[in-house]
Amino acid sequence: MAIVEVKVPELSESIAEATLLTWKKKAGEAVTADEILIEVETDKVVLEVPAPASGVLAAILQEDGATVVSSQVLAQIDTEASASAATAPAAAPAAAAQAEAAPAVAAAGGSKGDVAHPAAAKLLAENKLQASDVAGSGKDGRVLKGDVLAAVAAGAQAAAAPAPAAKAALPAVAAPVLTGELGSRPEQRVPMTRLRARVAERLLQSQATNAILTTFNEVNMAPVMALRKKYQDKFEKEHGVRLGFMSFFVKAAVHALKQYPVVNASVDGNDIVYHGYFDIGIAVGSPRGLVVPILRNADQLSFADIEKKIAEFGAKAKDGKLSLEEMTGGTFSISNGGVFGSMMSTPIINPPQSAILGIHATKDRAVVENGQVVVRPINYLALSYDHRIIDGREAVLSLVAMKDALEDPARLLFDI
């Protein structure tokens, strides 16, 4: 027997521990080298753990949901065993379990599909109930002893009564059977993912340590929309990516940050750190929570470069493939609630940064120009900033600079 250990990948110095998600293989199953066995969730990214060698997964040492640390052994692979030999012994206990389950069903008086735990089957028989009368909370809907006790306490009729169709908003929730009106009010308790918990921690930290103030302005998006419409087809053919609006917002933000460097700065103790580079964080929603990948040296990127990177970030966030390096650092952030239809918001600063721009849905609105009421596509901009180091003057003027750049996109081309 030749055993190879499966270990947690090396974590960065800022990450002390991680959480195991779901094993993709069971003990006794064959695995191939580099096949993904499980994913490890940190407070920033999700890392894949591949099989270091081919063979049979001899043992799983850490179960789903376990908290682990860097280089900890998760499982063992026997590189000399075969899957057939390894799984054969496991088949006998499985057959025995099936044999036990069959009498349990018969004792409960249920159908072939109503599987009850042996202890539950005994209680069902004593109380003259069928397994189909009780909502099972065990694996694959199996009826457990506690399910039967709850049904007996509530009354067999109440336990057997189906929930009204209109109330089945959470079909996946295995709620205990209750009496009265509470019977149709299911709840589900789900622990926060490590990433969600870290996001919550950082947001609270931001509000507790920063003197956050938000200033607003409105921008007429007609010039940007006209420019985009004129060139979007040629742009896509030339660069292989669509011309969106985010590249304009990024360029406008960099344009303003160059004029007001304190908005691009951060606080370190009693010092203000002014950054001579522009690393713009782009807030992206993912299935596991909010992530903020970084556009490095955004001032040196073309419109096409920005659009390509944002598309790449979106795809990686969806698949949980963003790396630690891609989400580390940043001097300023942009949050686009407009993609979800938001009209106005007060974004929270992403520490240790000192400001964040919130952009929203562009809608036709009635505005006054030269004494006349006209309809224009308006976007409301929100700049949240740390008032400890950024005065209202710099905050307001930087937002006005962004507005001016968007309402006259030629400024972005000539840097004026």
Image (cartoon, grey):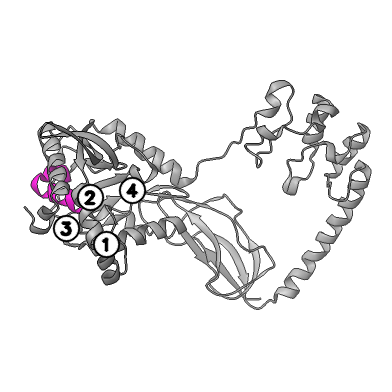
Q: Quadrant of residue 278?
A: bottom left
Whether residue 252 appears in magenta in the rendering, the answer is yes
Q: Is residue 245 left or right of residue 114?
A: left
Tell whether label 3 touches label 1 (CB within 8 Å): no
Tell whether label 1 touches label 2 (CB within 8 Å): no
Instruction: Please name the amino acid that badge 3 sits on.
Output: Asp
> Which contiguous range is marked in magenta?
250-264
SS category of the residue bearing label 4:
loop
Q: Nearer the viewer, residue 30 or 213?
A: 213
- Residue plotted at (20% across, 62% down): 301
Q: Nearer the viewer, residue 406 or 47?
A: 406
Q: From mark 4 to mark 1, how far is it between C-alphas?
A: 24 Å
Badge 1 is on which residue? 232
Q: Quadrant of residue 404?
A: top left
Tell whether label 2 touches label 4 (CB within 8 Å): no
Instruction: Please name the amino acid that badge 2 sits on.
Output: Phe
Badge 3 is on which residue? 299
Point out the tag, 1 or 3, that comes first from the N-terminus: 1
Point out the tag, 3 or 2, that comes first from the N-terminus: 2
Q: From mark 3 to mark 2, how far is it between C-alphas?
A: 12 Å
Instruction: Please name the amino acid that badge 4 sits on.
Output: Ala
Tell whether label 2 touches label 3 (CB within 8 Å): no
